[in-house]
Structures are given as structure tokens and as C-alpha cells.
Image (cartoon, rainbow, N blue to C red):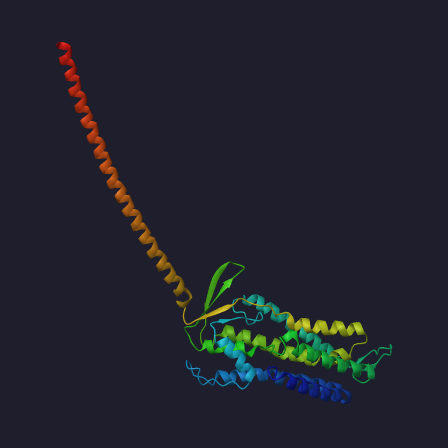
Amino acid sequence: IDSDKNRFVMVTYAAVSFLFLGGLQVSFDYTLNAMVIFYTFTSSLESVRIMLAYHSVGDENQDDLMISSEIMLAKFNKYNGTNEIKPANVYEDLGRNLTIVTMVFITQVVLISFVCFDMRNSNVNNCLDGTKGCPVAGTLGSWLFFILGIFMALVFQLGPKTKFGESEQNPYYWLRLFLVLKNDKTWISWNNDMKGIDEDNKLHAGDIRVWIRYFMSFLINGVGFHILVHALPLQVASQSSLTGVVFRAIGMMYLVDLDDTPGYKLTIHDNIHDTTDSNKEEDIDEINEAIKEAHVVLNTLKELAQKKQKLSSIISSNVVNKGKYSSVESKNTEIDIDV
């Protein structure tokens, strides 16, 4: 299982690969079928761990959660300690349109099927010296290529491609999401950078949309990834040139990387109101502040109106007094003239 200790994965993978190497030299077709069945079974063990952990808890209480892998438990606790989860590929990204997800899935299925069909019909190849009809893994050069393929596959499995040994199926992400589905009132929200808006979606127990995405992820990042990586030694051994080895290794890894793109950061909420509760509180505070400021402005306007009224009264009084004074003065002037 991918999430086991790195040294354990290295030893088991190398041992199983050498067993299949011997089987290919005895019966190519039967061994190839056995490889497909075996790696399909091993890739399903991650799903078994997820389902066992999922059914070990009740609908609401997660105290009884049982996870068989220490690495998986540590990763899950990291996810479970926050209400945000970060998808690692298009299948995990619930904010991504299902049409795009389906297109990527169909493309990967078709290309991986081509690789499997090609392996089944490539039991002979040309040797490095140009000799035709050499059995795959039946000559010294092909055998050495097979050993090189084992080393390259371990680099892909435990190197930076998988963040140094993390499972390509990302079981901790799916377990966290499945446990969230137990609550029918759960919502997820994300910020759509392309549209520049916040979007949300309601999840419920047994949500078919999530299970379809999980099934796609299992087929590609589980079964498909295991078949491509574990069949890499066989693919490398069937090459007749050094450049062909490079192209084969890079091309096969491109197939499983086609869906690997960081998605929208998803925020989990107990219900839809949680997505806006904090914003509502901020809006109420802003409204209260605006009301206070409006009251201050109104009071100021009232004071100014009162001052204006007083000033108008004073001006009117001064005008009346001035008129009376002018009338008295004119009468005194007339008396002086008569005299």
C-alpha cells in the first residue's frame, strides 16, 4: 500500500518485480494477466482502509475513528484539524465543472488502455545491437533495462512526484470528505478565481457526485497509476534504444500527471448560514456605525439650523432698529430746516 513506510515499499516492490521478471521468462501472457490482476487488487487496499475507517464511526461522533495506517492517521489529523481542504487533482476538486473532469477522465482511460494493449502485443523486440525477434526480458540487455525500470519506478513512487512517498490516491482527503458527508446539512464553499465570485454547494450523505469523482480517482490514480508504474520495468525492457527508454518513462508518467492540478481551496461549513454568518456580523456592525454617523450629522444639521435661525433673527432685529433710527433722524432734520 502506498502510504506504508518507504523502505517497506521499496523492498516489496523490488521483490514482486523480480518475481514477475521470472514469470515473464516462463510465460509472458499469463504473467502479464497476473500483473494486471495483482496491481488492481493492491490499488484497492487504499479504498479498503478508507471504507473501514468510514464505517468505524457513527453519524456524528468521530471519537471511535479507527485508521490502520499511522501515516494515514497523521495526514488525516492534519486535514481534520481545519475546516479547509485542498484538492490535489481535478477529481478531488468539487468546485471544478464535472464536464471538464469527465473529459480528463476519458482521455486518461483511453491512453492507459493503449499502453496496456501495447504491452500485451509486445512480447518481442529488437535488441540494442539490431537483432530482431528478441524476447522481452529474455536477453541480457533487456534484463538490465528491466532492472533500470525497477529503479526508475521506485523514484517515481517515492520521489518528488508523489511528495516523497505520499499516496497518489490521497486517502486522507477522501476520508475527511466522506465523514463530512455524514452530516446532511454540510456545505462547502470556494472562491472561483475565474469568475471572481464565491460559490457554494450542499453535500448530503451518499452524495452521488462525490462518489462518482472518487470512483474516477480510484480508476486513474489507483488502478491506472499502479499498472503504469509497476509495468514501467516491462515497458523499459521492451525498448530497443536508449532514447526510447527516456521517451517511454516520461510518456507513461505524463498520463497519470494529466489530472494533477491544484484545485480551489474548499471550506467546510456545518450549514449554509455559516458561510455568511461572519459577514452578516460585520455588516451589522457597519450598519450600526453608519447609523451613529448619520445621527451625528443630523444633530450637527439641527445645531446649524438653530444657529442660522438665531442669526436671521438678530439680522432682522438690526435691520428694524436701523430703520427706526433712520426715521427719527429724518424727522429731526426736517425740524431743523423749519426752524
Tell me the quadrant of the picture where the C terminus can be found. Answer: top left
| Residue at image coords 57%, 77% | 170
**Left or right: where does residue 323 sit relative to residue 263?**
left
Q: Residue 14, position in %: x, y? A: 70, 86
**Left or right: where does residue 300 sit relative to residue 225?**
left
Q: Residue 165, position in %: x, y? A: 62, 79
**Left or right: where does residue 44 sit relative to residue 113?**
left
Q: Residue 261, position in %: x, y? A: 60, 68
Instruction: Say if residue 236 shows up in the picture.
Output: yes
| Residue at image coords 15%, 10% | 337
| Residue at image coords 72%, 80% | 151
Tell me the quadrant of the picture where the N terminus can be found. Answer: bottom right
Q: Which of 96 and 209 is in front in this view?
A: 96
Q: Nearer the viewer, residue 2 or 220?
A: 2
- Res 148 quadrant in image: bottom right
Image: 295 above or below 72: above
Q: Which of 88 and 11 is in front in this view?
A: 11
Q: Residue 233, position in %: x, y? A: 73, 80
| Residue at image coords 67%, 72% | 255
Instruction: Say if residue 122 shows up in the picture.
Output: no
**Label tally:** 0
**Left or right: where does residue 97 sit relative to residue 125?**
left
- Res 113 quadrant in image: bottom right
Q: Nearer the viewer, residue 81 or 323?
A: 323
